[in-house]
Image (tube, rainbow, N blue to C red):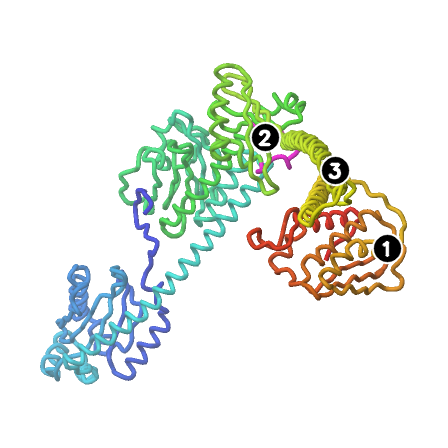
Amino acid sequence: MINMFSSGPTTEMNYKFVDLVDIPKLQDLMDSFYAVTGVTNALLDADGEILVAAGWQDICVKFHRSNPITEKRCKESDTQFVKFFDASSALNNRYFEYTCGNGLVDVGIPVYVEGNHLANFYIGQFVYEKPDVEFFKVQANEVGFAEKEYLEALDKVPIFTRGQIDQLMDYFIKVVSFLTDIGLQKLKLTRAEEALLLDEKRLEALLKLNQMYDATFEDIIDFVREESINLTKSKIGYLALLNDDGTLLSMHSQKQADVGECIAKDDVPDYPLEYAGFWVEAVRYGRPIITNDHEALDPLKKESLGEHLKILRNMDIPVFDGDKIVAVMGVGNKETPYVESDVRQLTLLMDGMWRMVKRRKAEGDLYKSERRNRSILNSIPDLIFKFSGDGTFMDYNAPSEESLMIPAMEFIGMNISDIFPKHISTPSIVNIKKALKDGNIEILNYQMDLDEGVRYYESRFVATGEDEVLAIIRDITDRKESEKILREKAEAEAANLSKSKFLANMSHELRTPLNAVIGFSEMLASKNFGELNEKQERYVNNISSSGSHLLEIINDILDLSKIEAGKMELFIEEFNSLDAIDEVCYSLMPLILKKDLKLNFSVDEDVGWIFADITKFKQILYNLLSNAVKFTSEGGSITISGSIIGKEGHFSVEDTGKGIAADSLSSIFDPFSQVEKFETKVEKGTGLGLALVKRFVMLHGGSLG
């Protein structure tokens, strides 16, 4: 409910009976009913105007209502019904019955819709029993009616029982109730559609208002006044602004439908509030004022300034800026009473108008500030914001509009805490206050998670006035990334240097004694220093093979380290791949024969000379073939295949071993990765063979499958 003072009805559903029911159709219905039943009926509105009348008896029309004496008795009957309908008890009674002085019975009942008395329904001009002819003869002689014609009219008067009347009234009540319910729903729908249409018009007005970019202040309030008149279907309107101390109203915009209608004949632009007339009551009382009947006694009326012309009704709306009234908008002389929806529409429109005015004022202030500081701001390539002491955005300068995350008009005048998250706004406000207090440059580094990723910023706050601080904001993401890259590079180089030193030391410290161990064990095995018994010979051979295996592991680790450090070089040359394959197979033949393995070849005729690093090619094939020999059971087979597809050589090694589980395929080429678990491991190995194969192949620009 809108808090307002009103004189006269302001309910949204202010309607009459004729607004709910199609009267001509109702007349047809009642005529048909009379033709069938012979029941005289009538429907009058609350003001006594006949809306529907059907089957009035000749005895009433031609005689009782045409003679002063009998007409007086009819009017007495009318008076009794009016008294009943005006009484509060009428709402609770079924109907009211009255036998007039002329000897006929009338029955009436009030029609209420939503508790409002809208009409009265009658049936009448009947009797409950056969009429006393002698009574009517005496009445005819008394007033001078022609007795024969009068008695003929009497014969036409219907006779009903009370039960019939009860049924008839119940029927008519239901019919009228049914029709009014339908009419009420239709009216409510119509009013709702009208309200929606008004909402659309108001929104269109606000849209146009927001598009008036180059309009002056006077243009804006003239537009709002016109829209206010149109929205409320008024004929006159005005808008006046209140001065800062609330004592003087300045008329800025008026309109009258014609010369005969206006708020004041005086052409006075300013009105002292204490002397102004009824149209400023909204300012005095701080709420909307509706006066729908100026001729009625109104407790709000005061002496008016100047000579006023005729005002039928008016509505005044105070315009607020926060809790302060800054203006008053008034409209008048609407054809129908002003209602609460008019208050709502006008209040919303004026609220939008005042926001527009405030924005224009803020834009004006910004423009003045911009002219004063723009040359300084433009000389700085970084993003710059000007803040007040409490962190409110006052101005900005951007290298480009794209550098702003949100449009300027959406944050100018807003506080930084309303725009940025707390981890940025809170320390920013602290730095703003410190810069104002100490006069020093305060620095804040922060990061923001944006759609394109994390960005890093540095803000420098410097005081430029008693309550103004500039924040110079620089995107330091690239610098952070560069620092990170340099730091990681330095760490990587340091780690690589340490690894290189470690590998060099390990190479020297391990290879030197290993070479001695291998050399002396081979000398002992050659029996140049004497014969060895069987046990000694087995031990010497174990020493030699273990030393060779350890040296092989060290060499593999050194090769892998060189590849990862990017120091492994390829020496590309042309060689016969078949010779290289034969050489590798020959070196592993003792192991192949020992396990009774069958070695198959499936090499195309055109596979021959290729360009590659022959040493790496042999090591690739050696690692693959030795791996196949190691994991193929005795009596199994190994197949070496080769073909030329396009300009590429394709080589493969297949065996009949137990294979590799599907969940291990993705990791078998990782360094130190082994399919067998340590606890169940049967074949020896470090897990470097296939890792070297992968890296040697990739160094050649090839791939594994």
Label 2: which secondary element? strand
In the image, is residue 372 above or below residue 71? above
Q: Residue 614 vs residue 303: left or right?
A: right
* 102, 248: nearer the viewer: 248
N-term-proximal mark, 2 vs 1? 2
Q: How many angstroms separate mark 1 from mark 3 (CA)?
A: 31 Å
Q: Which residue is mark 2?
A: 457
Location of the C terminus (image quadrant): bottom right
Q: What secondary structure is marked by label 1?
A: helix
> Which residue is painted at 36% across and 50% down in the image?
337
Select label 1 or label 3 by which is in front.
3
Residue 478 shows in the view: no
Q: Residue at x 35, y 37 (%)?
A: 282
Residue 601, picture quadrant = bottom right
Question: Across the whole image, how many numbered discs are drawn on residues?
Answer: 3
Q: Point out the stretch of residues depicted in magenta.
A: 395-407
Q: Position of residue 205 (x, y in %)?
A: 51, 46
Residue 430 sits above or below residue 627 on the image: above
Residue 346 falls left or right of residue 151: right
Give the mark nearer the N terminus: 2 vs 3: 2
Which residue lies at the image location 71% right of the left edge and 65% below the top edge? 636
- Residue 577 disc label: 1
Query: Circle 3: is it few (<14), some (14-19), or many (20+) Cα within 10 Å?
Result: some
Q: Quadrant of residue 114?
A: bottom left
Q: x, y percentage for residue 299?
A: 26, 39
Residue 278 rendering spot, x and y as whole percentages: 34, 37
Label at residue 8? none
Q: Is disc 2 surrounded by few (<14), some (14 to 19) or many (20+) residues within 10 Å?
A: some
Marking on residue 515: 3
Is 75 in front, or is 16? 16
